[in-house]
Image (cartoon, grey):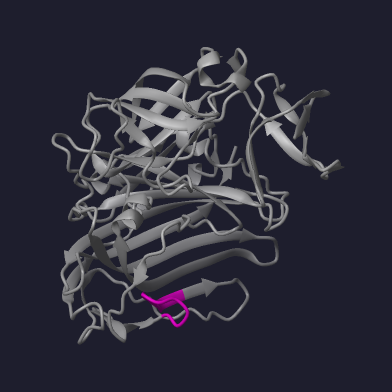
Amino acid sequence: MTVTVNGTSTKPLIVYTSAGQLAAIMPSATPVGTGTLTVTYNSATSATQAVTVVPSSFGIYSVNQGGTGAGIITNTNYQTVGFNSSANPGEAYIIWGTGLGPVTGDESAGGTAVKIGTIPVEVLVGSKQASVIGYARANCCAGLDQIAFTVPSGVTGCSVPVAVKIGNVVSNYVSLSIAASGRTCSDPSGITPITVTQNGTVSIGEVDLTRTNFTISAPAPIGNVTSTTDSGSAAFFRYNYAQYASTQSPLQLSTIGSCTVFNFTGTTAVPPAVASPIALDAGAAISVNGPNGLKTLVKTADQNGYYSATLGGGIVIPGLPSTSAPLYLSKGAYKIDNGAGGADVGAFSTTLNVFDPLNWTNAASVTTVPRASGQLVTWTGGDPGGNVYIVGFSTAGTTDANTVGAEFICVERTSAGQFTVPAAVLLSLPATNTTEITGAAAMILESVTTAPFTAKGLDQGIVSSSSATFQTVTFQ
């Protein structure tokens, strides 16, 4: 392999090869900047590929080997953290990964012969900055780096987000199980905690009622295109221990007052599904009965375990006849049931209260977001006992095939009235480039009310209602 940057060529140290993959260490002598990479095999050299070299760009290893979910984070005895072996505040732990930066010495000789210089390493645990004890190239393995830190106080949960920031470059986000005391974690979001044993499984059911609002500016003579849509969905799945432990919070919940980030390729800003749980049959349909009558969530033909329906509303385009149906989700109580149940999930019947929508009070000023500065979001209304989700995504690329992006999800209690999305979160997103074909960026403010329900065959059942406001933004 050959890397050429700014006229200087270096030879990456090949760690292993396989039929479809090469792994190598970028030499520390490689200049910083943009350049090219080629591979030569049996005297034939590949076409050049673009490469960008930066001083440091840390990647945290994860249990699922996909860069999400539970991170490879150990105590000082090198034992990994789990739901029933959680970390405690004040304890020292080690993050394992790669990409701390250049080293001195003969790196081809292994970790014992090299040393990493002083770099501005920050470890972010939940909403807090942890105290960094030290960092080094591991002396056991090629290209393996480690960062030792102290778990901060005031942050607990089964999937607490963890990231490493060096300068303005942020790592992938993984999760760490933290308990205030003892070794078994619990989720502070209000969802009933699940204890999963090494040999067990966990079955989860969700039913969601959602109102979504958005406005998109279109060129004249069309003008603003608006949409208010009510929809319903449900999902029922069974995870084994390995799948559940390696998934980045199956319910997409984060610790209250903190954020997590998902990286993706393609144009759909959806968290990657590394685990493949087993779909559960919860019956022929899910019924929803509220102030505006009865609606039915039907089983999705091409996705087992899913149910969905459009309940009301639609898109309004100026100058064209409206096809919008009457809205369905009004304030009040909704009865949700699955009739006689299904082959895997027994009959259930529960009631969910829907509150007035949230008001995003500073939405007009959240149009251009400086990623390195953080962004304040304020609101009023919603369920005073519920949570608010602040969501954002950005993509960059000239075709679907080369598009990359990231999505963040932050959670705060509705009663707080505001939340500042940290710079370390926003810097994980690519800057918005409106000239690119697949470039897109938006932020969403969503009020969420949740309640538990029980059914035979489920370890945890959750019904929720939400009201989401969507608007396009520019991430600088």
Question: Which quarter of the picture shows residue 78?
Answer: top left
Q: Position of residue 5 (x, y in %)?
A: 77, 27
Quadrant of the drawing holding the N terminus: top right
Q: Position of residue 108 (x, y in %)?
A: 62, 22
Q: Which residues are magenta?
A: 300-313
Q: Is the residue 114 above or below the residue 52 in the image?
A: above
Q: Position of residue 83 (x, y in %)?
A: 24, 45
Residue at x 38%, y 66% (from the top left corner): 211
Residue 186 shown left or right of residue 131 in the figure: left
Residue at x 17%, y 73% (from the top left corner): 455
Q: Is the residue 123 above or below the residue 18 in the image?
A: above
Residue 427 shown left or right of residue 74 in the figure: right
Q: Is the residue 98 above or below the residue 104 in the image?
A: below
Quadrant of the drawing holding the C terminus: top right
Between 333 and 356, the residue placed more toward the observer is 333
Q: Is residue 370 magenta?
A: no
Q: What is the residue that sits farthest to the front in this orientation? A: 42
